[in-house]
Image (tube, grey):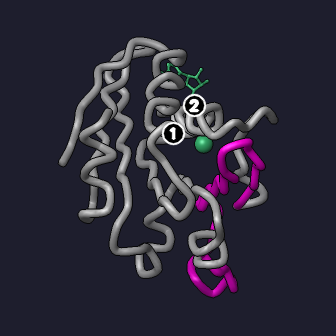
Amino acid sequence: MVKTFNINNPEETIMLGEKLGNVLENGDVVLLLGDLSAGKTTFTKGIGKALGVTRIINSPTFTIVKSYKGTKATLYHLDLYRLDGLNNDFDLYEYIETDGVCVIEWPYQVEELLPKEYILVNIIRTYSEKRTIEIKAIGDKYIKKVEAL
Ligand SMILES: Nc1ncnc2c1ncn2[C@@H]1O[C@H](COP(=O)(O)OP(=O)(O)O)[C@@H](O)[C@H]1O
Ligand SMILES: [Mg+2]
């Protein structure tokens, strides 16, 4: 199950993130693909909004993970760009198996550790502020959620 959206500006990226956030529950995992500045963190802001996070969500590049307590769920926002292989004793499941929603930028840094099921969001820069955003359900768990978008 995959859905494709044509986006015209950052506000629309946030709105789509919010739409996805509205169908997410504790334990859900979202992987974000896209080049630097594609809009992964911007999309995460929308997810946070839906989860009732009021703190400003910004790039966690230097900390790897930031958590935000929302009124509906806790958001774990991971950015693995700077994770240097797996010799870091980084425990992904500490976050994935916690009661919360886990959103991961640069997930293929831990390809071997990824769960079997997840929502894959691919943000493709087309022109200026325009983006094509594909949202794909990997595994049965997420089919209905992506269908609902
Ligand atoms: N349609 C769009 N969606 C998201 N960001 C956009 C869009 N158009 C322009 N931008 C700009 O691109 C940058 C995206 O930054 P960010 O979300 O941090 O990207 P990433 O996390 O993928 O590196 C922001 O400065 C934002 O204002
Ligand atoms: Mg980012």
Q: Are marks 2 and 1 in contact (CB under 8 Å)?
A: yes
Name which of mark 2 and mark 1 comes first in the sequence: 1
Q: What secondary structure is found at the residue carrying circle 1?
A: helix
- Left or right position of 136 against 104: left
Label 1 sits on what residue type? Gly
Answer above or below: position of 15 versus 56: above
Label 2 sits on what residue type? Gly
**Is label 1 within 8 A of ligand 1 (CB to nearest ligand atom)?**
no
Q: Residue at x 69, y 36 (%)?
A: 52
- Left or right position of 137 against 46: left
Residue 55 location, x and y as percent?
Answer: 81, 35
Foreground residue among 137 and 31? 137
Determine which residue is flagged by label 1: 21
- Left or right position of 31 against 120: right
Is 83 covered by the magenta stretch? yes
Residue 47 location, x and y as percent?
Answer: 56, 38
Q: Residue at x 48, y 60 (%)?
A: 29
Determine which residue is flagged by label 2: 46
Distance from the alpha carbon under mark 2 to that under mark 1: 7 Å
Q: Quadrant of the C terminus?
A: top left
Foreground residue among 42 and 128? 42
Few, some or many residues within 10 Å of mark 2 (<14, 14–19, 20+): many
Foreground residue among 140 and 15? 140
Which quadrant contains ligand 1? Answer: top right
Span of residues in magenta = 65-92
Which numbered circle lies on residue 136? none
Residue 124 location, x and y as percent?
Answer: 34, 33
Q: Residue at x 23, y 36 (%)?
A: 3
